[in-house]
Image (spheres, rainbow, N blue to C red):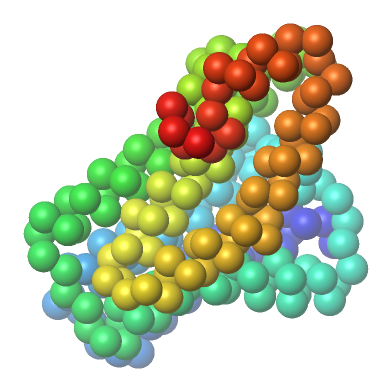
Amino acid sequence: MKMRHYINSHKGVTILAMLGLMIGFGRWENATAWLYLAMHGGYGLLWVAKSRIFPDPHWERTVPWYLGVFWLWGGLTLYWASGFLIFWWNVSAPAWYLAMCVFLYTLGVFFHFGSDMQKHAALAARPGKLITSGFFRLSRNPNYFGELLIYLGFGLLAMHWLPGIVIAGAMATFWVPRMIRKDRSLARYSEFAEYKKRTAMLVPFVI
């Protein structure tokens, strides 16, 4: 099967898995648990919709079933750690903390899905053209920046160090290597050297 089949199935089932934890632990009165369910579950459904409306060709590659199950499904399941901690320990975050997490998540959705849509539309209109405007004027990888904010948004709700380790691990093993490979690939464009000088790799105006 293709990579997207494993990824989309996991993203789509997240809301059901978290609802199962809600039922199993009986956290019906916990606002933090409900917010996590909405944020992580909603993100999963948005991802599936994105895959149908403006798909990423990178996920069209076929992978052996064992890589799909243990690498993709297994790796993505680590992101459920924050949800498990919230439902298990009945975490109840203060109102200001909830607001901060929602702010990060909302900003992340804007960057992640907005930049992916821009890339899809730009490449459809002008295939092979280096994209340097819009979201990509602020960062060479605005989609990853947005994804980072999304994961921080619902990951921090657990108020525990474990989700941070999961996110850092994903960045070290997948995100950063892929961003480096992307820079090397884009170096074939004559204007890339100047573009690289004036943009950050991930976080706008920072790094």
Instruction: Confirm whether residue 57 shows in the render.
Output: yes
Q: Nearer the viewer, residue 144 or 16?
A: 144
57 over 74 or under it: above or below = above
- Residue 128 on image: x %, y %: 81, 16
Instruction: Confirm whether residue 34 shows in the render.
Output: no
Q: Which picture quadrant has residue 170?
A: bottom right
Indicate left or right for 145 with 103 as reference: right
Residue at x-position 35% and y-position 38%: 107
Residue at x-position 42% and y-position 75%: 162
Q: Nearer the viewer, residue 64 or 23?
A: 64
Q: Which picture quadrant has residue 193?
A: top right
121 over 167 or under it: above or below = above
Q: Nearer the viewer, residue 191 or 71?
A: 191
- Residue 90 on image: x %, y %: 22, 83
Residue at x-position 17% and y-position 51%: 99
Indicate left or right for 188 with 132 as reference: right
Indicate left or right for 25 with 195 as reference: left
Q: Residue furthest left?
A: 95
Q: How many marks?
A: 0
Q: Nearer the viewer, residue 108 or 9?
A: 108
29 over 48 or under it: above or below = below
198 over 38 or under it: above or below = above
- Residue 132 on image: x %, y %: 61, 15
Quadrant where the N terminus sits is bottom right
Residue at x-position 26% and y-position 44%: 103
Indicate left or right for 121 with 110 as reference: right
- Residue 180 on image: x %, y %: 72, 41
